[in-house]
Image (cartoon, rainbow, N blue to C red):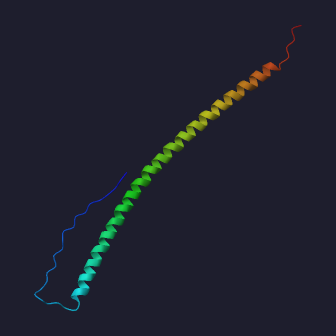
């Protein structure tokens, strides 16, 4: 599976007052840009975590199905082994049985 997310964020238009640049305007624009980058990274992290949860659930289901098959085959093998062992014991018992015909 391939997971991806597309987000379209509208471009933010910052109102620039007519040539009024204060000492904090550059710091403020840097903080806004950094917070937008942080929000993007956080959303990417949420997408990745959601993808990993789905992937883990799929793999857990596959593992449980595989385990169930293994248990079924093991029980079947045990039954076949016990029936063969019982047949061999009966055969050997008859083979070594002493019968007197008179």
On screen, residue 35 versus residue 75, left or right, reads left
Q: Return the x and y of residue 17 as percentages of the image width and height.
A: 12, 86
Q: Which of 67 and 22 is in front in this view?
A: 22
Position of residue 37 relative to residue 73, above or below, is below
| Residue extending farthest top | 102
Picture coordinates of residue 41, whole percent (x, y): 33, 70
Q: Taking 51 as reference, is 62 left or right?
A: right
Residue 8 at what x, y percent from top left? Answer: 22, 64
| Residue found at the very far right of the displayed protein | 102
Q: Residue at the spot x=26%, y=78% of the render?
A: 33
The quadrant in which residue 46 appears is bottom left
Q: Who is closer to the viewer here, 38 or 67?
A: 38
Quarter of the image where the C terminus is located: top right
Q: Which residue is drawn at the image coordinates 22% and 92% (left, top)?
A: 23
> Residue at the spot x=68%, y=31% of the render?
82
| In this view, 38 is above or below 24 | above
Q: In this view, does 63 lie to the left or right of 17?
A: right
Foreground of the two, 26 or 89: 26
Asked where in the image residue 78 lies, by quadrant, the reply is top right
């Amino acid at each position: 599976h391939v997971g991806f997310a597309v987000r379209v964020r509208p471009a933010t238009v910052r109102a620039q007052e007519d040539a009024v640049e204060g000492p904090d305007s550059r710091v403020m624009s840097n903080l806004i840009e950094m917070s937008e980058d942080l929000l993007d990274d956080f959303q990417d992290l949420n997408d990745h975590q959601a993808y990993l949860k789905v992937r883990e659930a799929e793999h857990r289901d596959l593992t449980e199905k595989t385990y169930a098959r293994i248990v079924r085959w093991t029980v079947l093998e045990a039954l076949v082994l016990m029936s063969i062992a019982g047949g061999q014991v009966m055969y050997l018992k008859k083979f070594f049985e002493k019968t007197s015909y008179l």
